[in-house]
């Protein structure tokens, strides 16, 4: 009689991943079906189960060594990613592989609002699925327990004691088992990892839970590092943007004061502002007069596709009226951009006063 990887893992009390590693190394003999699936003889499993029963036997030590190797490999894979999208995919891949599951959902937790927001959902092939679910802890008691008590929780769809709200979603999506793991960084929950099995209800082994908890802990640190890296990268980009803006505005001072009419000053102010910030557009106005310009170059694809533009407005008094600049950016305004736009408005007002 031959057993599948999953049945062999249950018989030996190890993870399916461990069985696969043992068969790949030759430690545990196996054959393969026409479809490429591993099959292990019942006799080999029984013999190994008997050997592992000895606490100090080589097989038991090998199982622990394999577990350690898995943790090290996972730590390297996860910690080497600083791009958030790549990191989320790697976390999901590690989780679905280690636990032989089908879906991994990774969420952020905001303690101020007590809200959990799904950040990414991947299947076991690494394909990202669309999921924008957001909920408060009061809606899902088991998620609250995982967040507040740092508990790892297994939910089987037939469990009469499970949270009805959680089970309703599982039934809707065709899930049989859900494992909820908190991501904890420096003693605080920063999110959740949820692993779903479509095919069967589960009782995870102690080894599987050790591995899953370790990966969740590594994921919490890695996501924190990726967030810090993104902030630093954004700060560097903001500094470069500001340097370009200051240089463009400085060079535009003489241009503004070289104009001979209010309309020409407004046009120059709109062009200088748009070019300084690489804006989608800038409109400069004073009273009934206005002018506009774009800072996008031919072929520039920074214009938002779904209404994500950000508008900043600056004004300066000018002969009983005011010069107003309305700048439309493709993304959020960076540090200092509001103040620099106000400087351009002041420069334009000064130029108009001399016309």
Image (cartoon, rainbow, N blue to C red):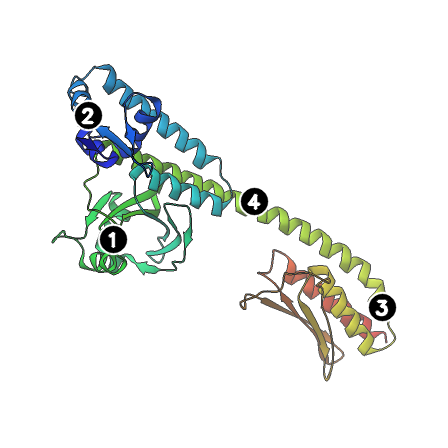
Mark 3 or mark 2: which comes first in sequence? Answer: 2
Q: In this view, does 316 lie above or below 239?
A: below
For the residues bearing labels 3 and 2, Cβ distance under 8 angstroms: no
Q: Which of the two residues, 146 or 297, is positioned nearer the viewer here?
A: 297
* Residue, far left: 160
Residue for point 27% across, 43% down? 150
Disc 1 from disc 3: Cα separation: 69 Å
**Disc assigned to residue 175:** 1
Mark 1 or mark 2: which comes first in sequence? Answer: 2
Asked whether, in this view, residue 118 is left or right of residue 278, the answer is left
Secondary structure found at label 2: helix
Residue that carries the numbered disc 2 in the rendered image: 45
State which mark lies toward you, 4 or 1: 1
Mark 4 or mark 3: which comes first in sequence? Answer: 4
Mark 2 or mark 4: which comes first in sequence? Answer: 2
Where the N terminus falls, by quadrant? top left
Disc 4 from disc 3: Cα separation: 38 Å
Q: Residue 125 is drawn in which quadrant? A: top left
Disc 1 from disc 2: Cα separation: 30 Å
Mark 1 or mark 3: which comes first in sequence? Answer: 1
**Disc assigned to residue 257:** 3
Residue count near mark 3 (Cα–Cα under 10 Å), binned few <14, some 14–19, many ≥20: many
Q: How many labels does the image show?
A: 4
Secondary structure found at label 1: loop
Residue 205: x percent and y percent?
A: 21, 34
């Amino acid at each position: 009689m031959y057993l599948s990887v999953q049945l062999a893992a249950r018989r030996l009390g190890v993870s399916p991943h461990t069985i696969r590693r043992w068969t790949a190394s030759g430690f545990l003999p196996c054959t393969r079906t026409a479809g490429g699936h591993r099959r292990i003889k019942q006799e080999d499993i029984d013999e190994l189960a008997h050997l592992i029963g000895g606490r100090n036997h080589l097989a038991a030590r090998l199982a622990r060594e394999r577990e350690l190797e898995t943790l090290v490999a996972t730590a390297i894979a996860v910690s080497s990613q600083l791009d958030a999208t790549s990191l989320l995919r790697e976390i999901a891949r590690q989780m679905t592989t280690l636990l032989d599951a089908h879906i991994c959902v990774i969420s952020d937790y905001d303690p101020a609002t007590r809200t959990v927001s799904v950040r990414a959902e991947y299947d076991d092939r690494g394909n990202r699925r669309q999921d924008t679910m957001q909920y408060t802890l009061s809606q899902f008691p088991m998620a609250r327990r995982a967040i507040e008590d740092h508990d790892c929780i297994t939910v089987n769809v037939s469990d009469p004691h499970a949270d009805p709200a959680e089970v309703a979603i599982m039934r809707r999506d065709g899930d049989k088992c859900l494992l909820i793991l908190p991501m904890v960084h420096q003693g605080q929950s920063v999110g959740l990892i949820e692993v779903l099995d479509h095919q069967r209800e589960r009782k995870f082994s102690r080894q599987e839970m050790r591995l899953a908890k370790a990966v969740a802990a590594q994921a919490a640190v890695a996501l924190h590092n990726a967030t810090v890296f993104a902030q630093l990268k954004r700060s560097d980009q903001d500094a470069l943007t500001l340097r370009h803006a200051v240089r463009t505005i400085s060079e535009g001072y003489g241009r503004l004061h070289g104009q001979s009419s209010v309309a020409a000053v407004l046009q120059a102010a709109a062009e200088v502002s748009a070019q300084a910030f690489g804006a989608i557009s800038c409109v400069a106005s004073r009273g009934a007069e206005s002018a506009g310009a774009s800072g996008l170059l031919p072929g520039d694809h920074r214009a938002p596709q779904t209404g994500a533009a950000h508008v900043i407005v600056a004004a300066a008094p000018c002969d009983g009226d005011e010069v107003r600049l309305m700048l439309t950016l493709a993304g959020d305004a960076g540090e200092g951009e509001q103040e620099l736009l106000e400087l351009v408005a002041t420069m334009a007002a000064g130029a108009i006063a001399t016309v």
